[in-house]
Amino acid sequence: MPIDYKSSGVNLDAADNSLTRIKALVKTTRTSQVVGDVGLFAGAFRLPEGKAHPILMASTDGVGTKLRVAMMAGKYDTVGEDLVNHCVNDLLANGAEPLFFMDYYGCGRLDPEVQEEVIKGLVRGCRNNGVALLGGETAEMPGFYGDDEFDLVGSIVGWSSEEDMILGKDIKPGDVILGLPGNGLHTNGYSLARKVIFEHAGLKVDQFVDELGGTMGDALLAVHPSYLEVVRAIRKEVTIKGIGHITGGGIEGNLNRVLPEGCKLKIDYGSWDVPPIFNLIQKLGPVDPQEMKRVFNLGVGMAMVLDKAEALQIRDKVFAGYRLFNVGEIHKS
Amino acid sequence: MPIDYKSSGVNLDAADNSLTRIKALVKTTRTSQVVGDVGLFAGAFRLPEGKAHPILMASTDGVGTKLRVAMMAGKYDTVGEDLVNHCVNDLLANGAEPLFFMDYYGCGRLDPEVQEEVIKGLVRGCRNNGVALLGGETAEMPGFYGDDEFDLVGSIVGWSSEEDMILGKDIKPGDVILGLPGNGLHTNGYSLARKVIFEHAGLKVDQFVDELGGTMGDALLAVHPSYLEVVRAIRKEVTIKGIGHITGGGIEGNLNRVLPEGCKLKIDYGSWDVPPIFNLIQKLGPVDPQEMKRVFNLGVGMAMVLDKAEALQIRDKVFAGYRLFNVGEIHKS
């Protein structure tokens, strides 16, 4: 009997089914900058006017093993939003505004319904950030991923200019670090968190946990916030000298990336309220406090470095619904 | 005993080791447009001057299960080049020139030596195409990918303009389709090929095959060519009305994407030499000839649609080392 593509594990009919579902969703993210139709070999995006010397900024990321929690909970429509917001925050950390996004969905066996849920989250994230979902790739790789496994990867492209980029160059001793509150693990540290919570402590994903005021799954799947509006609002009022997007590596690992020579961090751990999910993980492990600091954001979504006077000027104001808090200051190294 | 990140399967020391190896390689792809240093949250790229109204073009892709052949052969330094060239060709198909690239490397257990080999190929591909490797992400996802498994995803960003984009709009009946020769499967159809060659026919990856004049592994790992130089050279002489980058879907599946209403394809199968790897797969399956056409490029790397007179003008010339050949023509539908 002849061998065909389907018998080798690649189902082009499922791919067609999925593509039809996705196309309609993707169209809702179209902005006036998008050129042409879905289906080109490359997506096309007219660069907006308004910057004499544009600098493109770009970042690629995955959702990591937060995907496993989504799979355990059977809730697939939020990880895409996590991914878009994570990428938007990476741009913001260097002073860029997002323009468009592309996704990659690799899987063992293409389930069009699961993929549609994933894309729904991606599309929600794109729309909320005014970002066009310009392209994407679906790869069915039998025997590569497990049957029900998938990975989700995203790339974002934004723009800035020499004047608007945030690179940390002007940071000096005496500057103050303000934090923007996070709502959970965001997209980092899930391997450790899953090991502690599910393997070691034996909790279930649908288990109600008093300290969290909800289920374990809901707490772990809380969507990584986009700080686009709040960073925009703050930049209208003051100069942000440096930003750490607090992901793997923790507060110090990420803020150290933007410090110039001669500066070091003094983080005032204990000066802000750490969300209960982190205390729970630390207790259940136990996990060493130093390891907690190295792996998790501990409730600091973004950490911004400002001149002290400007920090005092804005610290007690509310920007786009966010209250700022003290994280520490810059010392001489 | 406290639980730490390493015991949960994420080895930050391996990540540091890998990052050190990679950074030096990545730096060799820096172009004068790259701003700042490796280590920003987002890569920064100064848009070149020279286009009044730039249109950014972008594409995301994976290597697919060609990776499995690389793993079987223990040869990891070419799949990255495949990926870059594939993405460059996607841009070319719509008339864009490449600017920068980003990669994602997801794996079960990070092996810095394997990753370094993979990045070597990526870097070679970037350098050959004059593309900066602007950023990337490495994700160690234990229990997600198998221990020795990885996936490799890339995103490319290029640019074009209203005048330079190739969208197929002016294609009309009577136009001629010319092909650029491929050198093998490129990056598509590997699930079917592997099933036929390794599972069904039981060939080995290091087996010498007379018809191929080399080993099975070498034939399957032949690097997907970049058609950047040849397309540039042809465009200096004539107008290319439409281009199909022949990937999954075959010649017709990909060329149909660029045809305007009222046109259909007439492909003259048999009018060019099909590389022996395809005949071998068809025979070993057997695979139905229709299925071969739907899955594989059959030796046509890119198919270009030109006005008949212009096609005749260039058909017998050599561009950047490539000889063109007849693939078919456009008929009225």
Image (spheres, coloured by chain):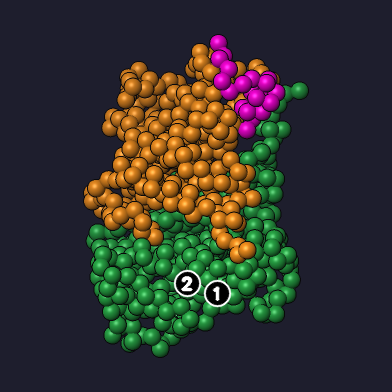
Chain colours: A orange, B green
Question: Which residue is under mark 2?
Answer: B301
A220 left or right of B5?
left
Placement of the N terminus of chain A among the 4 image quadrants: bottom right
Q: Residue at x 70, y 73 (%)?
A: B215
Question: Which residue is under mark 1?
Answer: B183
Q: Return the mark for residue B96.
A: none
Mark 1 lies on a secondary structure that is loop
Residue at the extreme right of the image, as rendered: B1
Q: Is residue A66 visible?
A: no
In front of the other: A177 or A63: A63
Q: Residue at x 32, y 63 (%)?
A: B160
Is residue B321 depicted above or below B47 in this figure?
below
Q: Is residue A115 magenta?
A: no
Q: Residue at x 32, y 25 (%)?
A: A320
Residue A165 appears at what percent x and percent y? 37, 44
Give the magenta-colored segment's residue range: A191-210
Q: Residue at x 33, y 22 (%)?
A: A321
Say which amino acid is labelled 2.
Gly
For the residues labelled 2 and 1, say whether their Cβ atoms are less than 8 Å apart.
yes
2 and 1 marks on the same chain: yes
Residue at the extreme front of the image, as rendered: A1
B314 left or right of A199?
left
B44 left or right of A185?
left
Residue A23 appears at what percent x and percent y? 36, 47
How far is the residue under mark 2 from the one under mark 1?
8 Å
